[in-house]
Image (cartoon, helix red, strand yellow):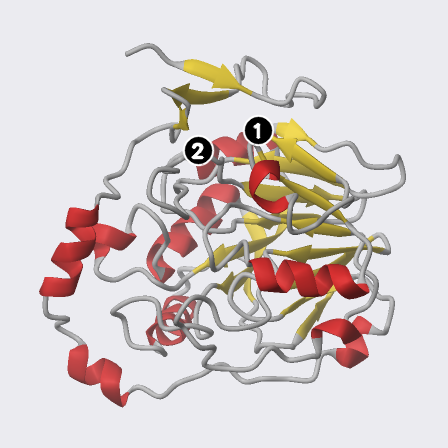
C-alpha cells in the first residue's frame, strides 16, 4: 500500500531529508511503529480485572493546589502547571497556553480545580494545541478563552477543520513534524515535532488529524512540551535537532494497563528515559493527578518519580510542581 507525505509548504522544514508526515489512505502514520487502537483492546481493558484495584481505591493522593496569580501577573519568564497538560508559559515576554482544559471532560470530573478563573488569565499570545483528543482539544475551554482573549493558534496538520468553527476569525497555523511556525522576529521560535500517538474524536475520523509535540526556543531558554506520547525513538531524534534543551514537560500518568496505554502515554520510568534521550536539564512532570484516566493508583506516578530521583536515575533536576505552582526561568 503506497504512502504519501504531507507538510505545510508555507512553513520551513528544519530536519534535513524530512519528506513530511507519512500518510496512508488519508490517515497519518507514526514514524517508527504503528499501534493497535482497536475497540477490541478497549473491550479487553473493561473485562480485565485491575490487579491494583484495592490499592487504587485507598489512594486518595491529589496534587497540591497553589494560587498562581503572583506569577501570572508578574511579567517574569517561567511556567505554571494548571493541571493535566495545560501550562501557562512566558518566554521572552511572550505568553503561551498549552492544550487548554479548564473543566471536566466528557463524563470525567476534575479531581482538583483549575487554579484560577480562566477569565483572569493574563493576555495569551499563542495557544499550542498538540492533538485532537477531547482532554487536550476541549471545545468549551477554547470558546471560553476566546471570549476574553485574542490569540493565535499553533497546531497540527488538518486541525483547522475541527476547531475553526469554534474560534471564528482566530488566526491559526498548521504544521507537520519538524516544521517551524511563522512568528515575529523577536518572538520565541516555535517548532512542531513528533509524538507517538493517534487521533480519534468520532466514528470514522481515526488519524485524520495529526498529533505532535512542541519546542519553544529563545536565546536564553529552550523548552520541550511533550504533549501525549508513548515512548519511541523520536525523543532521541528530536535531541539530534535540538542538542541543548533546558526544560522538558513530559507526561507521567495514564500508563496502566500497558497493553492499551503504552502506545499513548509514558510511565514515570519511560518518561525518565525520554528525558535522558532528550538530554534535558530540568524535568517537569505532567498529565497525572488531574483526571482518573487509567488503572494505576493516583499517587503512584509521584511516588515512583521520587524513588527514581532518590536512586540517582534522573539526570539534571526533577521539578515536581503542584498545580498553580510556578517555575521561574
Q: Are marks 1 and 2 in contact (CB under 8 Å)?
A: no
Looking at the rendered structure, the secondary structure element under dot 2 is: loop
Quarter holding the C terminus is: bottom right
**Which mark, by number, is residue 176?**
1
> In the rendered image, is residue 315 in sight?
no
Residue drawn at x 21%, y 83% is 55
Residue drawn at x 38%, y 31% is 30
Quarter location, residue 119: bottom right
Q: How crowded is mark 1: few (under 14 residues within 10 Å), some or many (20 or more)?
A: many
Q: In the image, is residue 153 above or below residue 254?
A: above
Residue drawn at x 56%, y 43% is 162
- Locate residue 301, reporting x and y percent: 37, 70
| Foreground residue among 234 and 158 | 158
Alpha carbons under labels 1 and 2: distance apart: 13 Å
| Foreground residue among 17 and 40 | 40
Q: In the image, is residue 154 above or below residue 311?
A: above
Q: In the image, is residue 214 above or below residue 292?
A: above
* Left or right relative to 311: residue 218: right
Q: Residue furthest top?
A: 2
Looking at the rendered structure, the secondary structure element under dot 1 is: loop
Q: In the image, is residue 176 above or below residue 142?
A: above
- Locate residue 11, reporting x and y percent: 70, 23
**Of labels 1 and 2, the one closer to you:** 2
Q: Which of marks 1 and 2 is nearer the N terminus?
A: 1
**Which mark, by number, is residue 208?**
2
- Locate residue 196, reporting x and y percent: 40, 40
Residue drawn at x 79%, y 48% is 220
* Left or right relative to 23: residue 324: right
> In the rendered image, is residue 159 in sight?
yes
- Locate residue 133, reporting x and y percent: 45, 51
| Foreground residue among 257 and 3 | 3
Quarter holding the N terminus is: top left
Amino acid at each position: 500500500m503506497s504512502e504519501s507525505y504531507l507538510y505545510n509548504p508555507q512553513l520551513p522544514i528544519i530536519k534535513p531529508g524530512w519528506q513530511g508526515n507519512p500518510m496512508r489512505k488519508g490517515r497519518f502514520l507514526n514514524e517508527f511503529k504503528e499501534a493497535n487502537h482497536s475497540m477490541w483492546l478497549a473491550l479487553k481493558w473493561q473485562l480485565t480485572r485491575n490487579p491494583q484495584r484495592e490499592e487504587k481505591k485507598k489512594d486518595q493522593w491529589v496534587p497540591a493546589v497553589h494560587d498562581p496569580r503572583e506569577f501570572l501577573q508578574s511579567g517574569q519568564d517561567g511556567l505554571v502547571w494548571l493541571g493535566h497538560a495545560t501550562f501557562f508559559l512566558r518566554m521572552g515576554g511572550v505568553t503561551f497556553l498549552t492544550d487548554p482544559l479548564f473543566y471536566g471532560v466528557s463524563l470525567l470530573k476534575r479531581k482538583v480545580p483549575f487554579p484560577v478563573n480562566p477569565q483572569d488569565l493574563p493576555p495569551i499570545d499563542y495557544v499550542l494545541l498538540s492533538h485532537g483528543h477531547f482532554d487536550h482539544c476541549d471545545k468549551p475551554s477554547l470558546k471560553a478563552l476566546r471570549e476574553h482573549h485574542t490569540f493565535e493558534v499553533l497546531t497540527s496538520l488538518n486541525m483547522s477543520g475541527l476547531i475553526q468553527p469554534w474560534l471564528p476569525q482566530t488566526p491559526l497555523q498548521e504544521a507537520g513534524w519538524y516544521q517551524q511556525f511563522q512568528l515575529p522576529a523577536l518572538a520565541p521560535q516555535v517548532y512542531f515535532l513528533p509524538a507517538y500517538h493517534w487521533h480519534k474524536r468520532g466514528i470514522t475520523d481515526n488519524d485524520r488529524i495529526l498529533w505532535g509535540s512542541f519546542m519553544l526556543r529563545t536565546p536564553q531558554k529552550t523548552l520541550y512540551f511533550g504533549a501525549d506520547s508513548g515512548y519511541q525513538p523520536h525523543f532521541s531524534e528530536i535531541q539530534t535537532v535540538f542538542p541543548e534543551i533546558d526544560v522538558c514537560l513530559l507526561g507521567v500518568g495514564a500508563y496502566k494497563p500497558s497493553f492499551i496505554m503504552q502506545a499513548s502515554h509514558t510511565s514515570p520510568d519511560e518518561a525518565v528515559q525520554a528525558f535522558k534521550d532528550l538530554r534535558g536539564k530540568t524535568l517537569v512532570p505532567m498529565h497525572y493527578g488531574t483526571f482518573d484516566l487509567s488503572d494505576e493508583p493516583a499517587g503512584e506516578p509521584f511516588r515512583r518519580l521520587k524513588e527514581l530521583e532518590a536512586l540517582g536515575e534522573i539526570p539534571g533536576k526533577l521539578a515536581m510542581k503542584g498545580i498553580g505552582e510556578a517555575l521561574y526561568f
